[in-house]
Amino acid sequence: MMMRALYAALGALALAACGNDGGPLEPADTAAWQVATAFHASGNPATLEEWGQFRIEGERLVLAEGVVPYGMNTALFSDYAVKLRTVWLPEGAEPASWDDSEVFSFPVGTVITKTFYYPRSSGGFERVALEHDPDAHFDGRALDLSAVRVIETRILVHREEGWAAIPYAWNDDQGSTRLARAGAFVDLTLIAAAGRTEALSYQIPDVNQCAQCHVTNAGDAQIRPIGPRARHLNGTYPYTHGEQNQLAYWREAGLLAGGPEPDAAPRNAVWRGETPLGGLALDAAARAYIDINCAHCHSRTGHARTSGLFLEPADPVGASFGLCKPPIAAGRGTGNRLYSIVPGDSDASIFVFRMVTNRPDAMMPEIGRSVSHAEGVALIAQWIDAMAGGC
């Protein structure tokens, strides 16, 4: 089918960059990075360096003392970028409070970072089916800057008045950053099979776009983290001392209080973009992918609540999940299809069309990607095709 051919074409993509594509790095101004880890209770520091979350040693980006890396069972897709996630609580702060389904309640002073980068490869950058946390270039404490191209770091900081989102763009020297309140674009080139290329303007979101995703309750319009929930964190992470369950480690490290033991806690499937799935259940993998990529908007409080399409883990796969559900106001976003999900027919499903298309007025998610995630599309298409029945 036409869509299957599109999956194959997308699956052949690999990343390369315009400029700074493998040559030696300029020496970093390491003095600028030697700043004590800090909580900025107001304002927007001009550089990432001023937060003290990282320091640069030679060609290594090293986590500061007390800054803890973490990973997601199934990760959000962001134009094939890999992400280094960290969390830091000020000395003496109370730990985060447990919640079975919502984001943990973190104390004022918490700083969460997410750094986006692409691994270097011969002639460009490696395309990763779905990021692993950590990957081969991060050893649990430091990221090898000579092996990657860092694009941006986003900070979420918990202040007295609530959470604030502050984006930083990395300069080409990979030794300095700049505040990107208005966002920025980084020109990349996607290199497909047989040398075919496709231009990509990687978008660093502005503050308003950060809020569009992180305001998960439109009623109070407050920014909140999305990832640090029990079900996303309940898995092992290769720390420098060895692999350990993240929930258990967070309790030991004083980052988290309360909740059941990991075996009794909620847990999403661990899916890394692999096909075939092997022993992983198709439904579990698909629901985990939809949860992290879609559910923060498609909930009863999120920005997409007026669509009537609710995709949270507690929602059954029925009409409100899209099964034989006609769109409310999708416009050209239907792709001339009648229903969100047509059991047994992914090609006829709006759900898959909106994941495939890169048209700004039709694609889903609306922000956070510029290219389609071939592996994610294939997973959801396989999930729909395996459903019995029809509309």
Image (cartoon, grey):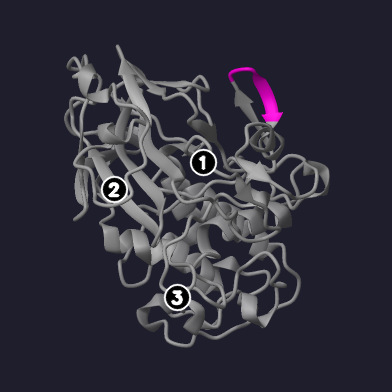
**Magenta segment:** 240-244
Q: Is residue 165 above or below residue 312?
A: above
Circle nearer the viewer, 3 or 2 = 3
- Which mark sits nearer the N-terminus, 1 or 2? 1
Amino acid type, callout 1? Leu
The foreground one among 226 and 359 is 226
In terms of secondary structure, where does tag 3 sit?
Answer: loop
- Percent position (x, y) of residue 284? 72, 54
Label 2 belongs to which residue? 167
- Which mark sits nearer the N-terminus, 3 or 2? 2
The numbered dot on residue 325 is none
Residue 279 visible to an observer of this rendering: yes
Amino acid type, callout 3? Asp
Label 3 belongs to which residue? 220
Q: CA distance from mark 1 to mark 2?
A: 22 Å
In terms of secondary structure, where does tag 1 sit?
Answer: loop
User: Is the Cβ of the residue at disc 1 closer than 8 Å to that at disc 2?
Assistant: no
How would you rate the neighbour count of disc 1 (Cα within 10 Å): few for under 14, some for 14-19, many for 20 or more?
many
Name the image quarter holding residue 386: bottom right
Q: Residue at x 62, y 61 (%)?
A: 102
Residue 13 visible to an observer of this rendering: no
